[in-house]
Image (cartoon, rainbow, N blue to C red):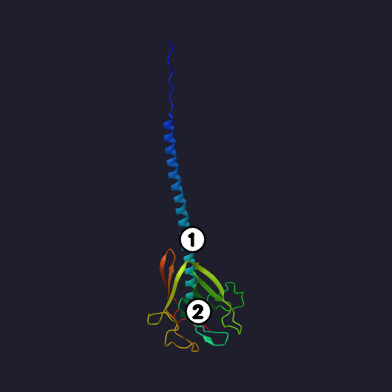
């Protein structure tokens, strides 16, 4: 007498259920992977913006720590103060135009202005100090984007922040040895970071250029 052979295997319903489970797991993994990639991109963008911010602050600190008392002349021959502060613009003379090899035939002094241009912080540099009869336009260098608000304050000899410089009652530019600020307070509102404030010490009245 022959024995009846039985076959074992998955039913159609079991296969469909298994496929549905694998599909759900695949969707979950794809979603998690997409979130992981987005998180990595966000972190990379934040790190890049932090690096750009640090570079901008280093440039500003280098420039402002080398401010000198050296008025300039405009294209009409009138004296312009060593430091001019108004609104979101700060203009000054400094001594950071240094040639490390000592081969360049130019002064170490240069005229710099920081101001808000559109939604970014811009550094402007004049190639000459005293303007010729035909004004020379400054070279513009965007150094930080995403800046919605910019404010400078200069700390005077009484440790009081001033929003305008020269302060009221200060000596005119024609008088040597004008009062120089002790520090510069930089306040910026940056997209994604909020308000940032940095205090930069200056040489005060220790450095005067001829």
| 16 w.r.t. 159: above or below | above
Q: Are marks 2 and 1 in contact (CB under 8 Å)?
A: no
The image position of residue 31, as x and y in percent, is 44, 47
Query: Which residue occupies 43% across, 70% down?
Result: 188
Label 2 to label 1: alpha-carbon separation: 29 Å
Identify the element where label 1 is drawn. helix
Q: Callout 2: few (<14), some (14-19), or many (20+) C-alpha neighbours within 10 Å?
A: many
How many dots with numbers?
2
Locate the N terminus by quadrant. top left
Q: Position of residue 177 (x, y in %)?
A: 47, 86
Provide the secondary structure element on which disc 2 rests.
Answer: strand
In the picture, the disc for residue 63 is none
Horizontal and vertical percent position of residue 51: 48, 63
Judge by depth and name the residue closer to the eye, 160 or 191. Answer: 191
Can you say whether 17 is above or below 34 in the image?
A: above
Residue 25 horizontal/vertical position (percent): 43, 41
Q: Closer to the N terminus: mark 2 or mark 1?
A: 1
| Mark 1 crowdedness (10 Å alpha carbons): few <14, some 14-19, many ≥20 | few
Residue behind mark 2: 92
Q: Nearer the viewer, residue 11 or 205?
A: 11
Residue at the spot of label 1: 48
Going by the image, does 183 lie left or right of 136? Answer: left
Residue pictured at 44% horizontal, 38% vertical: 22
Q: Nearer the viewer, residue 180 or 27?
A: 27
Quarter of the rendering containing residue 100:
bottom right
Q: Identify the residue at the far top of this view.
A: 1
């Amino acid at each position: 007498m022959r024995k009846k052979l039985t076959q074992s295997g998955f039913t159609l319903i079991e296969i469909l259920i298994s496929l549905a489970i694998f599909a759900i797991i695949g969707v979950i993994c794809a979603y998690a992977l997409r979130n992981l990639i987005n998180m990595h991109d966000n972190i990379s963008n934040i790190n890049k913006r932090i690096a750009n911010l640090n570079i901008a602050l280093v440039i500003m600190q280098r420039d402002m720590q080398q401010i000198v008392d050296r008025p300039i002349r405009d294209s009409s021959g009138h004296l312009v103060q060593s430091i001019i502060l108004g609104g979101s613009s700060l203009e000054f003379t400094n001594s950071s135009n240094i040639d490390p090899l000592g081969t360049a035939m130019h002064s170490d002094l240069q005229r710099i202005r920081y101001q808000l241009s559109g939604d970014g912080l811009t550094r402007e540099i004049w190639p000459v100090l005293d303007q010729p009869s035909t004004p020379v336009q400054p070279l513009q260098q965007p150094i930080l984007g995403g800046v919605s608000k910019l404010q400078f304050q200069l700390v005077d000899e009484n440790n009081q922040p001033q929003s305008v410089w020269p302060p009221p009652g200060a000596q005119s530019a024609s008088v040597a040895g004008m009062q120089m600020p002790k520090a510069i307070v930089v306040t910026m509102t940056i997209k994604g970071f909020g308000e940032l404030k940095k205090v930069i010490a200056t040489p005060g009245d220790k450095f005067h250029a001829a």
